[in-house]
Amino acid sequence: MLRITGGRVYDPANGIHGEVKDVCISDGRIVAEVEGTGVRTIDASGMVVFPGGVDVHTHVAGAALNFARAMTPENQREAVKFIHSPELRAGIGGITPTTFATGYLYAGLGYTTVNEAAVPILSARHTHEELRDTPIVDKSCCVLMANNELVLDLLEEGETERAKQVVAWLIWAAKGYGVKAVNPGGVAAWKWGKDAKILSEPVEGYSKVTPAKIIASLAAIVNDLQLPHPLHIHCNNLGAPGNISTTLETMKLLEGYRAHMAHLQFHAYGGDGWNSLRSEAATLAEYFNAHPNLTADAGAILFGNSVTITADGPWQHLLYQLTGHKWGNLDVENETGCGIVPYVYKGSNLVNAVQWAVGLELLLLINDPWRIFLTTDHPNGACFWRYPEIIHLLMDVDFRRERVRKLPAKALKRIVLGDLDREYTLSEIAVITSAGPARALGLSRKGHLGPGADADVAIYNENPDRELMFRYPRYVLKGGQVVVEEGAIRKVVDGREFIVHPSFDENIEEYLRPLFEQYYTMSFDNYPVEMHRVEGADIRECG
Amino acid sequence: MITLTLKEQPRVPLEAEAISPDVMAKLRHDEIRAVPMFLGKRQRRLDDFFEVEGEASEDLEIRGDVGKVKWIGRGMTRGRIRVAGNAGMHLGAYMKGGTIDVSGNAADWVGGEMSGGLIRIGGNAGGQVGAAYRGSLTGMQGGTILIEGSAGLEVGMRMKRGIIAVKGSVRDFPGLQMKGGTIILGGAELRTGAWMIRGTILSLRPIPLLPTFAYNCNYNPSFLRLYAKHLQIQGFSIPHEEGDGAYLLYSGDAAVSQKGEILIWQPRASS
Amino acid sequence: MNRADFIIYWGGNPADCHPRHFTKYTLTPKGKHVPMGRKGRTMVLVDVRETPSVRAADIFLQVRPGKDFEVITTLRALVKNQPVDQARVAETGLTLAQLQDLVGRMKNARFGVIFFGMGLSMTRGKHMNSAAVLALVAELNAFTKFVCMPMRGHGNVTGADVVMRWTTGFPFGVNLCRGYPRFNPGEFSTVDLLVRGDNDAALILGADPGATMPQPAIDHLARIPTIVLDPKVTRTSRLARVHITTAAMGISAPGTVYRMDEIPLPLRPILQSPYPTDEVVIRRIHEQVKAKPAWLPASFKKVPCA
Ligand SMILES: [Zn+2]
């Protein structure tokens, strides 16, 4: 039993905004009160108490990230090293951290839950193996569905009900938590070297299936299956000048459904070429603010090294042609694919400067913090361990303006960031880093400090230097255990995995089995991930 | 001067990046003796392996066969290291200035990713001289490496600036993915200049070329006089008089670029 | 393979080494988008000698030993319409016309794939030969869809590679002596360590280096304390100080094997074994090692060099 006393508590989900009050913990959960002897006390005077961070969209495990690790030994050489000790496994931080280091780095930042946002079903077994080796944090997975030909073929034939059954079966087979749609139709087309740029045009290889149809159908299916997290969508035309029209069109298709828009920064551009690229964050925010069915994450970029990894193969090939360095591409049979390109965002580069501004503009112009969350689409826009830099930019308008002034003069005409006065409050930071994403993920025991919540708590020294404050938490608790103290890992605990079990008609297997024999190189019986491979599975029944 | 005399051969490689003028310049005798080194996975002291004479100097002399001692002179910026014997891997890697002299042979990665300074090897060198470490986009970015004997694979891989001169012959892939700088060879096995983008490779003996290099002209470039003069001081002579012969100039590698140059010396027929 | 209509096997003999590859994955199956199966595909075999795989090929290109890098580099230039030296091309054993024809076919493919075997990746040029294939394939994507995939050796090589990557950040050639992972093939790769005699003990799991490595490496293994975990008696187990018999993976021990394309497959044991699995043995060894005092001094916190 534990009592955290004297700290200013930010628990926006429960309407608490900086009151000094005690937080009590028993058996890994928050409780109203603890009594008697044997209660340990943490004196949090002069500190602020947050619910543990929740990352709604990150890439920390699986085939694509693991491929990127192999591609970039030069990054690993320069990265922070984790030295082997009796408590810690050896590892490497940096842009694509090793699994153990990923757990240490997230916990070291005060984050206790992460959602791996792109899991191909065929290699989901691999993703779960890596997640099992990612300690401390709790995890969930979004499985890739919008280019899965089993699903697309059914949509082509108008068999919506069967498509729903197949989706449900696939989620359970992958031991996933949510459904992700990446560049709907575009990745399937990329297997022919094509893309899907216009939402109303049939996808290469189909006559009736359009990206629009895929988006609307999946949103409806996820809705019907009553999954805790709505459709998680990465729009078509990621990163392309003028893609604002595609993004708005996608959001219109989603009217009437809940949906989560991933890494919006990459989807809010105007202009008709790289030379005329400009921010359309204001246009996007205006629509978004008026449509409460949507949530989003920022996908902000920061200047410096990154590795871009997405299931969006066509975009990645374009990026390779632009940079001319390394390029890796994986196609995953009939399901999805991914591309990998190391990339350096430069403050002096006009395009990168606009991108940098757009991420912050979205965070500032979308006025409900409960609907926009802090992400960098790690490691695409920047590494997750750089979140404190973004928090600093959001909380301090003078610091932000100073940075804006350093951008190329040409960029200033393409952005509105310099005109924005808004400064985030600590409460709002607690919303965009924890309470909001937990709610969007439907994780009722995360993101708050009310009785019954998991005792995941981040305690920071109050410090006017917000970057420093959030970079080195004074304490981090996971499930009631102190895992980080003064910025160093004290105790390593195992994390859990959240998975959903949507209800489906068992007979769907009779439909799928022959298709597998025909088109897959893996046998039907080997395809589903066995439950024993998921460590600490926390299963939610749905529908 | 500080003298380090090897007491006995380490059984497994000894990692000794502390053997550098930058580290030693301000250390007292007892501090030098306590400098950490890594024998396999064990952290040890310098005096576990070396007799130490002298203190606080930028002039180091190492006596004995330190062919299993790695990272000597890593990142050094000044001063001098003399090795009377063989030197182990990564000699002068990331070096920025100063001089390293080895009387015997050196192992792989001599001057890996160095950006300044001078390394002279009296015997042979291993592979990856002045090269980029795996995955890095750029190898050597400045400085000079002179090798009296032969060298191994991938000499000057991805180098961008500086000079590497090898009197003897080198194995495959000299100047691999080279971006600039100059490599002078007394001959080479296969695939000289493979995928080179820019830079100059000069061979004093005939070498096989990839199909992606095209003959351009016979050529006696004026910049060679400067190089010849510079290297003559170090005991390297490069033929450059028109009366003696000419260089056949090839450009490539067409797989990636046309801007790399390979110059092959052709002495004037004596008849 | 539901898409590939143009397949190149380079430096491999799948008919003998990977017999299921043709029939199950690449050549004969009627793919979703190649409904005619074998008739809908063109197969090119590039190798230094005629093997049984030649019979399955539409085109056989016999390259001279050790000239693969020259050929691929030439192809890279031809793909970009750059000039090459005809006489030096001929030294590879293939004519310029043959290579131009190949480039034309590659560009005209709807979906091309290159499988490259150990005849490429383990011969003169080694990793640069593999790099050449990767570069060629990346560049071909400016014209059409092209991918490549290595054909690895026997055993779960890919699995080891995959797990090393997520635990250490590097696929192979990793050294942990300084308390964190470092990578430098040539310096830390097994065969190089053994040939130079840089290690003073060896634990060997799921491999038989005594049968495949050069003699100086084998001699060193015999000199030092070598421990082998293997279900069978092997060349390596005979020269080892200790041989621990373990249950055979996939037959009597469960686990995961990664296919060459890095797709993980579960292994389900069909027999009971009286022997412990590799995992059990390693865990027991690890427990004992863990009980010893930490080998890095407590003062060792900073990382002096990468
Ligand atoms: Zn993402």
Image (cartoon, coloured by chain):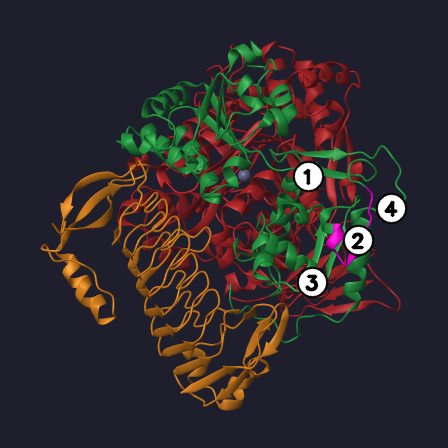
Chain colours: A red, B orange, C green
Residue A372 x/y as whole percent: 54, 42
In this rendering, the answer to whether C88 lies above or below A351 is: above
Q: CA distance from mark 2 to mark 1?
A: 19 Å
**What residue sits right under mark 1 in the picture?**
C155
Query: In what element is the residue under mark 3?
Result: loop
* Quarter of the rendering containing residue B23: bottom left
Q: Are marks 3 and 1 in contact (CB under 8 Å)?
A: no
Which disc number belongs to residue C275?
4
How busy is the neighbourhood of tag 4: few (under 14 within 10 Å), some, or many (20 plus)? some
Residue A336 or C16: which is nearer the viewer? C16
Residue A240 shows up from this direction: no
- The residue at 73%/38% (across/down) is C256
Q: Are marks 2 and 3 in contact (CB under 8 Å)?
A: no
Q: Are marks 3 and 4 in contact (CB under 8 Å)?
A: no
Q: Which residues are magenta?
A: C237-247
Q: Chain of mark 3?
A: C
**What residue sits right under mark 3 in the picture?**
C224
The nearer-to-camera label among 3 and 4 is 3
Residue B270 x/y as whole percent: 13, 52
Whichever of callouts 2 and 1 sits on the residue coming sooner in the sequence is 1
Residue A235 x/y as whole percent: 50, 30
Q: Are marks 2 and 1 in contact (CB under 8 Å)?
A: no
The nearer-to-camera label among 3 and 1 is 3
Are both tags, 2 and 4, on one chain? yes
Where is ligand 1, by quadrant?
top right
Whichever of callouts 4 and 1 sits on the residue coming sooner in the sequence is 1
Q: CA distance from mark 3 to mark 1?
A: 25 Å
The type of residue carrying mark 4 is Tyr
Q: CA distance from mark 2 to mark 4?
A: 12 Å
Question: Horizontal placement of A236 versus A154: left or right?
Answer: left
Q: CA distance from mark 3 to mark 4?
A: 26 Å
- The residue at 57%/50% (across/down) is C170
